[in-house]
Amino acid sequence: MCLKYLKILVVCLSLSLCTSLGALAAQGDALKVGIMNVQKVLVQSEPGLKAKAVFEKKKSELEAAFRGDQQELEKLQEEIEKKSSVWSKEKKEEQILEFNRKRRDLQTKTEDAGMEMKRLQDKELEPIIKVLEGVVDTYGDKNGYSMILDSKNGVIFYNKDLDISDALIEELNKAMK
């Protein structure tokens, strides 16, 4: 969902700014293009760093919760490998069924945790992205940009002097305080 917002942001900004290109060309004004790295802005801004800390904390909690299940599964696998030759057929089948059940349970828990992390990411990043949209609009207007593009979505080449990501990080930090 985060990538969806980023793409929508880029497309909206590009379209809104592209519509003014015809008017600019007709007026003879110079075209001023800025390039931003949305990922860099999100990762290096203060709100992005706070969101990352929330993700990392939750990730650590989930990993700790699964560590015991994983170790138990590994122990059971070792036991099956070591003792299966001396077990009866019924005991061996019972242990393999138990191992498979525990493995499926762990897979289900892992998938659920992945979905939970995705929801958390969307929850944490959505307000930042909404503020960033306004920051980019304001920054673009204030600094006379005709267009601001995301360096990771459709820009094949650009002069690094056009990159305004650092300035947008500062503006986003101010806007989110």
Image: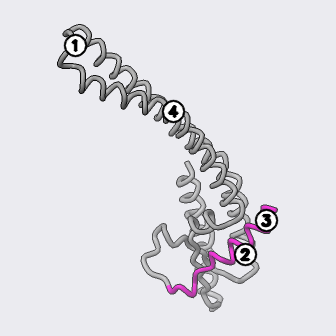
Which comes sooner in the sequence, label 3 or label 1?
1
Q: Residue at x 56, y 73 (%)?
A: 149
Q: Nearer the viewer, mark 3 or mark 1?
A: 1
| Figure check: 152 above or below 57 | below
Determine the secondary structure under disc 4.
Answer: helix
Tell me residue 127's x, y (percent): 71, 53
At label 1, the amino acid type is Trp
Give me the disc on residue 175. Answer: 3
- Alpha carbon distance from label 4 to label 3: 34 Å
Which comes sooner in the sequence, label 2 or label 1?
1
- Residue 11: quadrant of the picture: bottom right
Pointer 2 with pointer 1, Cβ within 8 A: no
Question: Which span is picked out in magenta?
Answer: 159-177
| Figure check: 59 above or below 70 | below
Q: Nearer the viewer, mark 2 or mark 1?
A: 1
| Figure check: 170 above or below 92 | below
Neighbour class for label 3 at 10 Å: few (<14), some, many (≥20)?
some
- Mark 4 = which residue? 112
Q: Nearer the viewer, mark 4 or mark 2?
A: 4
Magenta span: helix, strand or loop, mainly? helix
- Alpha carbon distance from label 3 to label 2: 11 Å
Tell me residue 40's x, y (percent): 58, 68
- Mark 1 = which residue? 87
